[in-house]
Amino acid sequence: MSRFVARTGALLVLGWSLAGNGFEVVIQGQRLVPEEDSQTCIEIAGEYPGVRIEASEVGKVPQVCYSDAKRDILSIHNVTFVALAQPEATAAVSPVEEAETRPLAETGDEAQKPVSLQPEVVIEFQHTFPPGPNGRVMARAKIGGFFATADGVGVATGSRLRYEGLFIQGGGEDTIAGPFEYTVGEAMDSALFDNKAKKRYLIAGPRTLKAKLSFQFAAVGQKLTLSPRASVSIDTGSRFEDKLEEMEEGIEVPGVGSSKETAPSGEEPLDLEEELNL
């Protein structure tokens, strides 16, 4: 009997390891997974169709990592994307399609001239976390960075990106406060972008966090560098800013009086590199 119980327990643990981990990165259709179950980072440097991924800083490694030590978080680090030529893909696209400029939710300039764009680069990464934190939580999606020309002169006008953080549980997939879309304008400052989104959920049990990043360069050689904190995460929602917003919206915050003059206490934002042991 004891042998059966021990074996059953081992099978349950093995089942969670195989079915519950779900840590993967897909770049231009190429799937990357950890070599071992214990790995919390996947290195992504190298060349893929239409793009090269290299380190944004000397001595750093481009990678996607996760942690559930203090919160559930999935993040991409130390990354610069460089546009490569795609002769075959470019030839398959008509001149009209190349010059197409779709309206996006946010742009660097109000008026923008149509530009020829390189084929779209698509990157997705996800991880399934074990239960906790449960109950009322806050999901967050963050991204920041900048586009640059090949030689650093001028502006990468027309280059654009779309970033979406997703919360998945029970077969349902929900976008965290909508996707972020951005197009570089003609002003130099428009090449820089930064966005934060968050949404409340009531959850229990395993949950999956996923990020989708797609972008197009206006020319071969242009670069996209992401800030260190591009991530999707879940926490208890007890930061000062969260509690202050809830008080302003008239939502009762546990342990805090209803008066708006009462300053709520909250957790300080975590050091991402320290949290992920980078």
Image (cartoon, rainbow, N blue to C red):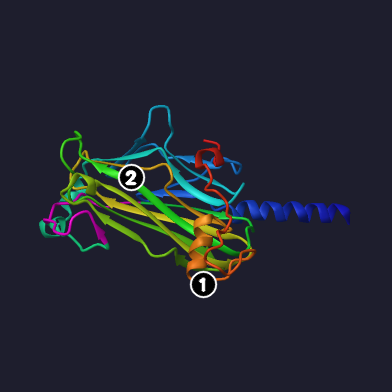
- Quadrant housing residue 221: top left
Place of residue 96 in the rendered image (x, y in percent of width and height, measured from the top left): 11, 60
Residue 66 vs 265, above or below: the answer is above
- Asked whether, in this view, residue 225 is left or right of residue 135, the answer is left
Q: Amino acid at mark 1?
A: Gly
Mark number displayed over residue 145: 2
Crowding near pointer 2: few (<14 within 10 Å), some, many (20+)?
Answer: some
Q: Residue lying farthest bottom?
A: 250
Residue 30 appears in the figure: no
Q: Residues within 10 Å of mark 1 (few under 14, many from 20)?
A: few
| Amino acid on which disc 2 is placed | Gly
Let me know if residue 258 is in the magenta part: no
Closer to the chain start, of discs 2 and 1, is 2
Q: Main secondary structure of the magenta part?
A: loop
Magenta region:
106-122
Percent of width and height locating residue 258: 58, 70
Q: Is residue 256 left or right of residue 26?
A: right
- In the image, which disc is placed on residue 250? 1
